[in-house]
Image: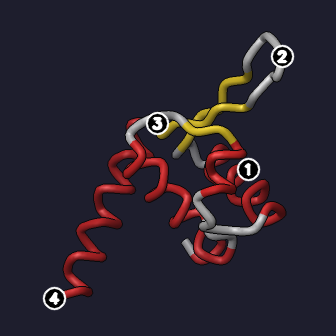
Amino acid sequence: MEKLEQTGALRILLVLYRNKNPMTISELLDANVVKQFALYNALKKLKEIELIEENREDKWPFRRIFRLTDKGRLVAEKLLEIEDILEK
């Protein structure tokens, strides 16, 4: 869990969850949750533990598109519950 927070991965999970749609790297960078280098590290970690999945487009501009897995969606929902508790 600590490694996920150090890379900003938990914030990325929440952005993907709130967006409801798959997102590209550019869109994730535009969301300003983490810097570019941290984004790549966080995406790698999230993929390793199967919280997100990546698809690559076959045609130009060959975008990488990220979406939550079912497991990732469940984790994001729990994170939102924790946020709600802390804000009360």
Q: Quadrant of residue 80?
A: bottom left
The reply to whether the C-beta atoms of the residues labelled 4 and 3 are less than 8 Å apart is: no
Residue type indicated by callout 2: Trp
Q: Nearer the viewer, mark 2 or mark 4?
A: 2
Looking at this rendering, what residue extends furthest in the top direction?
59
Q: Which color mode does the image show?
A: secondary structure
Question: Looking at the image, is mark 2 or mark 3 earlier in the sequence?
Answer: 2
Q: Callout 1 environment at 10 Å: few (<14), some (14 to 19), or many (20+)?
A: some
Quadrant that contains the C terminus:
bottom left
Badge number at residue 7: none
Q: Callout 4 environment at 10 Å: few (<14), some (14 to 19), or many (20+)?
A: few
Q: Which residue is mark 1?
A: 44
Q: Which residue is mark 2?
A: 60
Residue type indicated by callout 4: Lys
Residue 49 position within the rendered picture, expressed as x and y whole percent measured from the top left: 59, 48
The reply to whether the C-beta atoms of the residues labelled 2 and 4 are less than 8 Å apart is: no
Q: Is residue 39 left or right of residue 85?
A: right
Vertical placement of residue 20 versus 86, above or below = above
Q: Label 2, secondary structure: give it.
A: loop
Q: Which residue is mark 4?
A: 88
Q: Callout 3 environment at 10 Å: few (<14), some (14 to 19), or many (20+)?
A: some
Residue type indicated by callout 3: Thr
Q: Which residue is mark 3?
A: 69
Residue type indicated by callout 1: Lys
What's the distance in space between the residues labelled 2 and 3, CA to CA?
A: 25 Å
Instruction: Give the residue displayed 44% in from the left and 58% down from the top.
Output: 14
Vertical placement of residue 55 versus 52, above or below = above
Question: Looking at the image, is mark 1 or mark 3 earlier in the sequence?
Answer: 1
